[in-house]
Amino acid sequence: MRIGPTEIFMILIVVLIIFGPKNLPKLGKMFGQTMKGFKEGIDDDDDDDTTKKAKTEKSEKNDEE
């Protein structure tokens, strides 16, 4: 099931009717900030996992010595 251009157009019309033309830039900005924060959170989580894994491997090597 794919969303075609007609469905996207209909969704945009409904959003325009519900929120009005004055609020659309605010909603776009808010959505963009939310997505940016979400991506940064995922990247930070990946970095934390990598750092923890490296520390664990380093401590295991030290324990073996």
Image: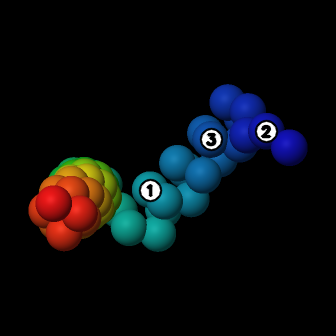
Q: Nearer the N terminus, badge 3 or badge 2?
A: 2
Spot the residue most to the top. Answer: 5
Spot the residue most to the right. Answer: 1
Dot 2: few (<14), some (14–19), or many (≥20) neighbours within 10 Å? few
> Which residue sits at x=23%, y=63%?
64
Q: CA distance from mark 1 to mark 3?
A: 12 Å
The label shown at residue 64 is: none
Which residue is denoted by mark 2 in the rendering? Answer: 2
Camera-side mark, 2 or 1: 2
Image location of residue 10, percent across then percent down: 65, 47
Which residue is denoted by mark 3 in the rendering? Answer: 8
Of 41 and 64, the residue lying toward us: 64
Q: Nearer the N terminus, badge 2 or badge 1?
A: 2
Mark 1: which amino acid? Leu
- Quarter that holds the C terminus: bottom left
Camera-side mark, 1 or 3: 3
- Give the answer, above or below, for where 34 lies relative to 11: below
Which residue is denoted by mark 1 in the rendering? Answer: 16
> Which residue sits at x=44%, y=56%?
16
Contact, mark 2 vs mark 1 (Cβ under 8 Å): no
